[in-house]
Image (spheres, rainbow, N blue to C red):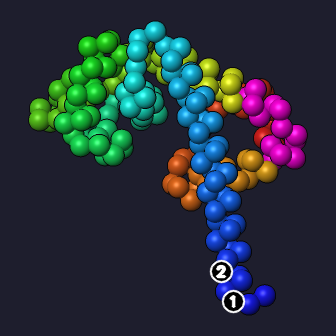
Amino acid sequence: MAEGDAGRVQGEDLSAVISAVLTGSRLLVAVTARSLGAVEDGVTLPQFRMLVVLSGHGETKLVTMAELLDVNSSTAMRMADRLASAGLIVREVNPHNRRESLMRLTDEGRRIVDEVMERRRKEIGAIVARMSAAQRRALISAMNAFNDAGGEPPVTGPHPLGWPDV
């Protein structure tokens, strides 16, 4: 194969991968929207991201939250204000540094995160259940590689249908 042919094949492969990932991401966004749409509190997707980060990190400084969400501090503060007004997080002054604001989930905030994630797990589980065992193994390998390349830490917890690690 000539050098130009190798570059074209690689480009075609890259295009196919990008197309597959975009299609998969569209499916996952739809699953996310449906699971979040079932929450009666009307939490937006960016607000839910903040709740999920708090769920994973525990009590967090506002400036750290802004960095984790890749938004500016004023945007994070507005989101936190809305979530605090809804009773989903608590914002307090850091007793060790009065210039800092700390936030944490309330019990209701934790309930919403757990409920939405469970709905999402069930729907993804139903989709994955329609795949063969070999396809599931290939998906695990591909998604782990994709997540590693993107710097996304793994989600912990059981598989949605109680499958062993395959």
Q: Is residue 127 magenta?
A: yes
- The answer to whether 155 appears left or right of 9 in the picture is left
Q: Is residue 152 magenta?
A: no
Quarter of the image where one finds residue 75: top left
Foreground: 63 or 59? 63
Q: Position of residue 8 (x, y in %)?
A: 67, 77
Identify the secondary structure beneath mark 2.
helix
- 10 Å neighbourhood of mark 2: few (<14), some, or many (≥20)? few
Q: Position of residue 63 (x, y in %)?
A: 24, 41
Label 1 and label 2: CA atoms lie apart by 7 Å
Q: Position of residue 104 (x, y in %)?
A: 34, 24
Q: Which residue is mark 1?
A: 3
The magenta stretch is 125-137
* Residue at image point 28% right, 27% down: 79
Foreground: 10 or 32? 10
Check the image and report above or below for 69 versus 18.
Answer: above
**Mark drawn on residue 7:** 2
- The answer to whether 9 appears left or right of 76 in the picture is right
* Residue at image point 11% right, 32% down: 98
Tell me which amino acid carries mark 2.
Answer: Gly
* Residue positioned most to the bottom: 2
Asked whether disc 1 touches disc 2, contact meaning CB atoms under 8 Å apart, the reply is: yes
